[in-house]
Image: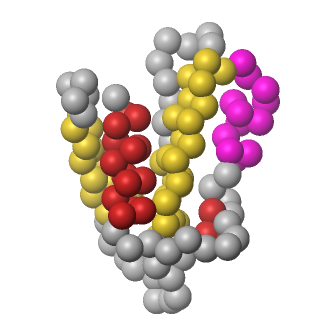
Amino acid sequence: MRMVLAVLLVGALLFSGCEQKENNDVYIGMERDTIQDLVAGVEMDYVNEFRGHLEHWAAVYIVYKPTEEEIHISPLFMKYTGKDPRPSGQLRFEYDTYGGEDGSGTLR
């Protein structure tokens, strides 16, 4: 269900005019090796990673399910990549899926 959110997020980033960069510098600090379960070699049923970036923002959404767990885990990493001054305030988001799940959050 969160997979639908991830696909929509990445699709929005890709189709809204982002440009493909030759290097992945915008994703530094948002790699899989920052997630302890993935680094420790815990057995997984699946690991899916979605990436997208625009002129001033980059996002990585990783969805994984450890074999021994009943639910999946889905951290979202967002990074401002523009020049200073950095934005301040809150970023609020909501999502709704076809499977009936929904949620919201605030990033500060």
Q: Is residue 5 left or right of residue 23?
A: left
Q: Quadrant of residue 38?
A: top right
Query: Which residue is depicted at the point 67% across and 60% down?
Result: 29
Look at the image and tell me whether residue 7 can be seen. Answer: yes
Query: Which residue is depicted at the point 36% across and 64% down?
Result: 15
Residue 16 screen position, x and y as percent = 34, 69
Q: How many marks?
A: 0
Figure check: 50 above or below 58: above
Figure check: 30 above or below 53: above
Q: Is residue 18 left or right of residue 32?
A: left
Residue 20 screen position, x and y as percent = 55, 71
35, 32: nearer the viewer: 32
Q: Quadrant of residue 104?
A: top left
Residue 97 screen position, x and y as percent = 24, 34
46, 65: nearer the viewer: 46
Tell me the colour scheme of the image: secondary structure
Figure check: 95 above or below 3: below
100, 13: nearer the viewer: 13
Quarter of the picture containing the C terminus is bottom left
Asked if the stretch drawn in magenta spans residue 87, the answer is: no
Figure check: 18 above or below 49: below
Look at the image and tell me whether residue 66 can be seen. Answer: no
Asked if the stretch drawn in magenta spans residue 41, the answer is: yes
Where are the magenta residues, as a range? 32-43
Residue 91 screen position, x and y as percent = 32, 63
Q: Is residue 76 left or right of residue 96?
A: right
Query: Which residue is depicted at the point 44% across and 72% down?
Result: 18
Q: Quadrant of residue 99?
A: top left
Quarter of the picture containing the N terminus is top left
Query: Which residue is depicted at the point 53% across and 54% down?
Result: 51
